[in-house]
Image (cartoon, coloured by chain):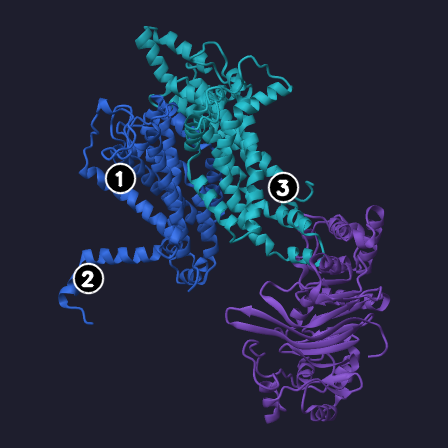
Amino acid sequence: MKALITIFVMASLTFFLVRLMPGSPVEAYIANLVTQYNVSHENAKAQAASLFSLDLNAPVYQQYLEYLGNLMRGDLGESLVTRGVPVSEIVLAYLPWTLFSIGTALIISFSLGIMLGMLMAYKRETKLDHILTNLGSIVSSIPDYLMGILILVWVGVQWELIDVTNMRGSLSPGIQPGLNLTFIGDAFYHASLPILTYVLGTIGLWMLTMRGSTESTLGEDYVTVAKARGLKERRIATAYVGRNAALPPFTQLSISIALVFGGSLLIEWIFVYEGLGYLLYNAIQQRDYPVMQGVFLIITTMVIVANLLADLLYSRLDPRIRVAGRD
Amino acid sequence: MEGRDKVLSVRDLEIGYSTGRGLVRAVRGVSFDLGDEESLAFIGESGSGKTTLGLSLVRLLPQNASIARGEIVFRTASKEALDLTTLDDEDLRRFRWGECAMVFQSALNALNPVMRIRDHFADTAKDHGETNGTLKGRALTERATECLQMVQLDPDRVLGSFPHELSGGMRQRVMIALGLLLNPRVLILDEPTTALDVLTQRAIIEVLRTLKDEHRFAMIFVSHDLSLAAELADRVATTYAGRIVELGEVEQIFYHPRHPYTVGLLDAVPTLAGGQQELSSIPGSPPDLIDLPTGCKFHPRCPYATDKCREEDPPLIEVAPGQTAACWHWEKVGADWEAKGGERHERDAHQA
Amino acid sequence: MAATTGERRYRDSAVGRILAWFASTLKLMARNRVGFAGFLVVSTIVLVTFIGPVFLPSEVPVNVEEIYETPTLSHPLGTDSEGKDVLLQIINGGRPILTIGFLAAAISTTIAVTLGSLGGFVGGRVDTGFTWLADMVLTIPQLPLLAVLAGVLRLNSKITVAALIGVLFWPTLMRATRAQVLSLKERDYVESARALGLGTPHIVFREIAPNMAGYIAINFTLAVTASMYAVVGLTLLGLVPLSEDNWGVMINLAWTRGAIFSKDSVFYIMSPIAAIALFQLGLVAMNRSLSEIFDPRLRRGA
């Protein structure tokens, strides 16, 4: 499917970037070893080979195939900075936090957004509607990472409402992961600011889209007929209006997913939240190329998977687009 | 009317729409009674106010419309008289569909696209639970099956489907079936066959005819299609510019019309059988409901118009037992009609 | 009232024409109050940041005596950790960001409109190919990719940065353009152009494109917002080694110098953020005016 092809293309792209571009990291690494550490070119190549999981002596296409093969096996190379530690291990340690924070944030943001959007549509042109519309516009104009900084500056420092230093990291020291309340509570505590930032960054989109689609759904025949059928107002609002109006915003989910994963790079850095974004940032700073490559690939894969899930969910929600026979 | 029980009484109903250009007087003083097993057809061109009339009976008029005067009295099974114009929201909700169901024109988008047909039935039954004893589970399925069979649909196929999986004609029939679910006393059908192909039209008409013959409820049809009235109505009212211009039993209207507009409508219907005849249509176009002509509203298009017509708007005059027409010259209209060979129309009507 | 020859000469001159154009633009924008406000904000910021530095010293004086001052008359927005006046920095610091923003938006708009129009009009494999490409680019999380590229390559020219951003942001606009083209394709004037045998490029660029002018304008402004997001983001990460002080660098410095966590330096932190946010807000508001101008159905009143 398209998804697999995209991943494939991305993987290849990364390969070319890392390996083939003039001044590529591999070359740079080798050059560095040779000049700074006086390692022989052969040895330098060997080290690079093991680090990047590449066989530098073989012809390019073979290296490429080997690279792909390694990928399939989950071998992403080894970290430059922390020697001997496979990238995949590092990534797996950071991945869950990003998924957790982004997942929770998207669920909250979407649900809240469509509820507010529907409210705004029902109360069109009233003060509430105007206030919410403008608020939504303003909040969505501010880049999410700046929002994060704003939260830090105002809520944390100026007004001293939250102890931000304490909230750094994804988990308080000493707490063990497990399915108990302390762990879950602590995880939420640490994730709350990033989640808040993601929510503020995306909720405007849902609100405004939902408002528009609710407005047009309200004019649909089946809503008028539902009233003629003597259905209760609440039932009409949820099952007839809401259910149908929520479909267009849902299609915007894929855009949000990409945006949010992208923003995680900065937001996790700002709040010192130990997720993939944070990992990527550090890797870039330290020029830890294998990790950079690995994390980037994983992030892209996550986005693609998330989009697939969203598509699947959508086909469950809208019976009109289910492919015949796949029900 | 004979001593049948009246289920609906409308008196002097006036409804207007406020638009940017002015007040559109869509219904200008309509009065009629509906017997509890009678079918009454309102026939007229678009803009004659017939749809507005239908909507007003279930109080589903759009925001910019209002009932200026008049009363609509509905008699329930327990002989209680409900003034529909003053019902509060909750009573209105229960009244809708429970006592009186309105099936709209073009059911293409009348069903919730994300819900199955059986859920539509369940919804309707559930929200009317208090008044009817909640119909659910097996009882609901049985009743829904019954209703679907009444409209000649296969319940097994239809109940589990989504609206987009059904054709336009099937959806229209589902709407009628839904309308019958709660055993309403009155069924209102707005253009039930418009926007459907000829074969489906036939099917729907058959369904409606069977319903009429076998079940005990009153029906109101609103249409521009005279032949529908010929097939299904007991009484026919022709409407023009917001008023009833002729009202009578179906045979009286078809064989002995007394209003020029009715005559025009009858003449305009070409017949399949019979020899070539001149096709005629009523010259001119319907009046602007904001800026109506003086006197009789039909006079600009009427071959019988005189000064009196231009000055005075005729009321409904009794022209025969059970038949009224709003025309100063109804006698002349009648004489011309009988002379022209009303028989030809008789023969054609039989073939319909 | 007949115009004198002098007046007429003035009016017809270049200056006169430009002023007339300005006047009509203002009048157009003024149709929507919010949009007009946005337009004012945007134009003011653009003017101030592009023309202001001409009149002001490019090197902001360091004054160790006045670290982190609160706003006073001589320093309306306070000073930073080196005693440099914040307002001055703000005025100086807008241009690099805005330039890259506009440049990148221009690049992505061009790519999007070209691909979208051609694909929508020509259809078939070409169209499928382009759409496919757009979908792929859309799935890639832009900021991480840019960050990785920044780490791997060396980004030292504004054009490179703008190009990189532009190359990543075109898919959404391309989809929208394509949809528009598809609907316009069936219109009468296109049919007649086709009947006249005018070639594809002619039809695309001379018949269809002008009708999408409004659409393109709106999406251009949105592209500017998106590019600014990317540029500022990259600068914050310290990945864009532009030497000048710009708004992004200001925030970055505030972060690295710990200004975020001290109470006194609020204005230093808030000023660039406010400037960026204000500009974005202005663009979004301006969009409302643009939508009204170009979509007659949305115009209120006659």
Residue holding disc 1: C49
Q: CA distance from mark 1 to mark 3?
A: 49 Å
Residue holding disc 3: A315
The reply to whether the C-beta atoms of the residues labelled 2 and 3 are less than 8 Å apart is no
The foreground one among B151 and B289 is B289
Q: How many marks?
A: 3
Label 1 or label 2, whichever lies nearer to me, is 1
Q: Position of residue B252 (x, y in %)?
A: 78, 83
Q: Position of residue A180 (x, y in %)?
A: 64, 19
The foreground one among C14 and A35 is C14
- Please determine if labels 2 and 3 lie on a single subunit: no
Q: Which color is chain C depicted in?
A: blue
Disc 3: host chain: A
Say which chain is cyan.
A
Kindly state the secondary structure of the residue where label 3 is placed: helix
Q: Position of residue A176 (x, y in %)?
A: 59, 14
Residue holding disc 2: C11
- Please determine if labels 1 and 3 lie on a single subunit: no
Amino acid type assigned to the residue bearing label 1 in the image: Thr
* Drawn side of residue C94 relative to residue B100, left or right: left
For the N terminus of chain B, the quadrant is: bottom right
Label 2 or label 3, whichever lies nearer to me, is 2
Kindly state the secondary structure of the residue where label 2 is placed: helix
> Which label sits on residue A271?
none
* On screen, residue A160 above or below A54: below
* On screen, residue A275 above or below B200: above
Specify whether residue B191 is in view.
no
